[in-house]
Image (spheres, rainbow, N blue to C red):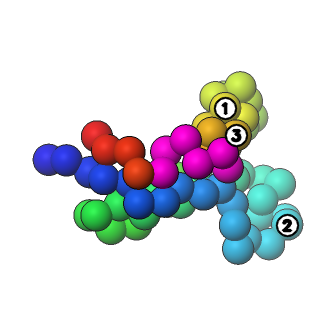
Amino acid sequence: MCIHFGECSSTKGQDSETQEKNPIIVMVTNQGVVEIELFPEVAPKSCQNMMGLAEKGYYDGGSL
């Protein structure tokens, strides 16, 4: 199976309380929408990296 990423964004459209708790990454693929909840208290550096890359558009247009 090949998944094509149309868009990836971080925590857009959430209220500020939810954003401060656990950020959500939203990936729009050709197979549907995937929401990924991040846990910065468990993996702070990984969460920071993923959110930064998503905001820069790194995942946009990619495929698995």
The segment highlighted magenta reads 55-60
Q: What residue is drawn where x is 73% and y is 71%?
A: 14
Mark 3–mark 1 distance (CA, rounded to whole Å): 5 Å
Q: What residue is drawn where x is 67% and y is 32%?
A: 49
Q: Dot 1 corresponds to which residue? A: 49
Mark 2 nearby-residue class (10 Å; few <14, some 14–19, many ≥20)? few
C-beta proximity under 8 Å, tags 3 and 1: yes
Mark 1 nearby-residue class (10 Å; few <14, some 14–19, many ≥20)? few
C-beta proximity under 8 Å, tags 1 and 2: no
Disc assigned to residue 16: 2
In-front residue for pair 37/13: 13
Residue type at mark 1 is Asn
Q: What residue is drawn where x is 26% and y is 64%?
A: 31
Given this view, does label 1 or label 2 mark the residue nearer the observer? Answer: 1
- Decide: is 27 above or below 1: below
* Relative horizontal placement of residue 54, taking residue 45 as reference (left or right): left
Mark 1–mark 2 distance (CA, rounded to whole Å): 20 Å
Mark 3 nearby-residue class (10 Å; few <14, some 14–19, many ≥20)? some
Disc assigned to residue 52: 3
**Looking at the image, is mark 2 or mark 3 earlier in the sequence?**
2
Q: What residue is drawn where x is 30% and y is 53%?
A: 4
Give the image location of residue 16, x and y in percent: 85, 66
Give the image location of residue 3, x and y in percent: 26, 51
Residue type at mark 3 is Gly
Which of the image's four quarters has the C terminus? top left
The secondary element bearing badge 3 is classed as helix
* Relative horizontal placement of residue 25, taking residue 45 as reference (left or right): left
Give the image location of residue 43, x and y in percent: 66, 28
Main SS category, magenta section: loop
In-front residue for pair 30/36: 30
